[in-house]
Amino acid sequence: MMIKRIKTLTILERLRRHEMLADAHELATIRSHVAQLNDTRNRMLDALKHEGHLVSLEAAPYVGAYIRAVRNEVAQIDKALAQIMPRLEALETVVADKFRNIKTISLARERAEKHQQHIKDKKETVENDILSLMRHVRKTP
C-alpha cells in the first residue's frame, strides 16, 4: 500500500512539475517581452530628452512632429504594457501556486518514504533480534 502511494505521489509530482514548467516558460517569455518594451520606452524617452530641443532654425518645423511621434509611440508602449501586466501577474500567481503544490506533494512523498523506511528498519530489527535469540538459545545447553 505504501509503495503504491509513493509511486503515485512521484508520478503526480512529475506531472505537476511539467505543468509548472510550461507556465514558467510562458512567464519567462512575457517577462522578456515586458523588459524589451520597457527598454524601448526608456530609450525613446532618453532620445526625446536629448534630441527634442531645437538645434537650428531649419529643424524647427520637424521637432514638434518628432516630439509628438515619440510621445505617441511611448503611449502605445504604455498601452501594450497595461494589457500585458494582468496576464503577467496572473501567471506569477499560478506558477507560485503550482510550486507550492509540488512542494506539498514532495513533502508527502518524502514522509511516505521515511515511513516506509522506518517500517522496513523496524522489521529488520525484529528479524535480527529473533536471529540473535535463536543463536543464543543454540549456544546455551
Image (spheres, rainbow, N blue to C red):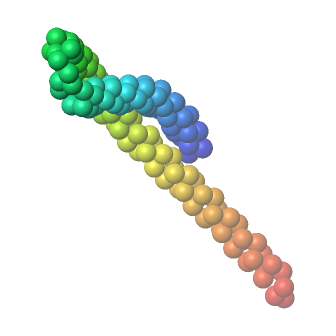
> Is 29 above or below relative to 103?
above
Instruction: Say which quadrant the N terminus sits in.
Output: top right
Residue drawn 65% across the image and 68% down it = 126
Residue drawn 63% across the image and 63% down it = 121
> Is 58 above or below relative to 109?
above
Q: Using residue 40 as the reference point, say whether residue 114 is left or right of it.
A: right
Question: Does residue 118 appear in the picture of this structure?
Answer: yes
x and y percentages locating residue 32 in the rendered image: 40, 29
Q: Residue furthest bottom?
A: 141
Image quadrant where residue 39 sits? top left
Residue drawn 24% across the image and 31% down it = 50
Q: Residue furthest front?
A: 57
Q: Using residue 141 as the reference point, say whether residue 123 is left or right of it.
A: left
Question: Does residue 72 appear in the picture of this structure?
Answer: no
Q: Using residue 58 as the reference point, say whether residue 8 is left or right of it.
A: right
Q: As rendered, which of 53 and 27 lies closer to the eye?
A: 53
